[in-house]
Amino acid sequence: MNKVLLREKKVVLTSIIAFALSACAMQADKIEKAFLPADSQQARTEIIELISKSLGGKNVPIATNVFQESSRLLIGTAPVTSPQGIKIVNADQKQAIIFELVKQGENCLLQRINTTQKWQLKTKRCFTP
């Protein structure tokens, strides 16, 4: 009788440990939107280089507070404005390119939304809200 009870306890304990370990593994793989702290010039420089590389070497002006207020960066062409101040939409208006800063475990990642491009940043200072 005691052997059966002991065996059942082992099965329950093993199940609990397996569940806890799988929950931890799932949490480590969880991807969440992330932000950069205000004093993240080194991360900003790295991000500018990665975005330029992603866009075929084009230099794109990036704000000094990139990813501090939003986890996404949209890059698009500026609208054409008439002399009267009316915005003119071209027929060949291109869709905005979207980059997103995310955190997965302890890693900060920059990903381009409309492609499969993803880069791990050297910085570990990004944070989730």
Image (spheres, rainbow, N blue to C red):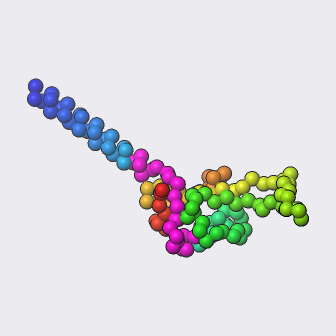
Q: Visible in this render: residue 127? A: yes
- Residue at the left extreme of this rendering: 2
- Residue 39 is a magenta residue: yes
114 horizontally vs 11: left or right: right
Can you give x and y, in whole percent of width and height, for residue 64 in the image? 61, 71
Q: Residue at x 86, y 51 (%)?
A: 91
Label count reads 0
The one nearer the camera, 25 or 80, is 80
Residue beneath the point at 32% across and 44% down: 20
Please give left or right for residue 90 compared with residue 106 in the image: right
From the top left corner, tell me how far across and down residue 43 is, in percent. Answer: 54, 70
Is residue 8 highlighted in magenta?
no
Question: In the drawing, does residue 99 fall left or right of residue 92?
Answer: left
* Range covered by the magenta-colored residues: 25-44
Looking at the picture, tell me which residue is in the foreground, 120 or 92.
92
In front: 64, or 105?
64
Where is residue 106 drawn, in percent x and y? 43, 60
Which quadrant holds the N terminus?
Answer: top left
Q: In which quarter of the view is residue 57 placed?
A: bottom right
Instruction: In the rendered view, tell whether residue 64 sits above or below residue 23.
Output: below
The extreme right residue here reads 83
Q: Position of residue 58 (x, y in %)?
A: 72, 68
Return the residue nearer the eye: 78 or 101: 78
Q: Is residue 110 visible?
A: no
The residue positioned 12% from the left and 30% from the top of the image is 3
Location of residue 24 with respect to 128 vertically, above or below: above
Which residue ends up furthest to the top in the rendered image? 1
Q: Residue at x 49, y 63 (%)?
A: 126
- For this view, does 125 lie left or right of residue 68? left
Tell me: residue 124, above or below residue 98: below
Vertical side of 98 occupied by 60: above or below: below
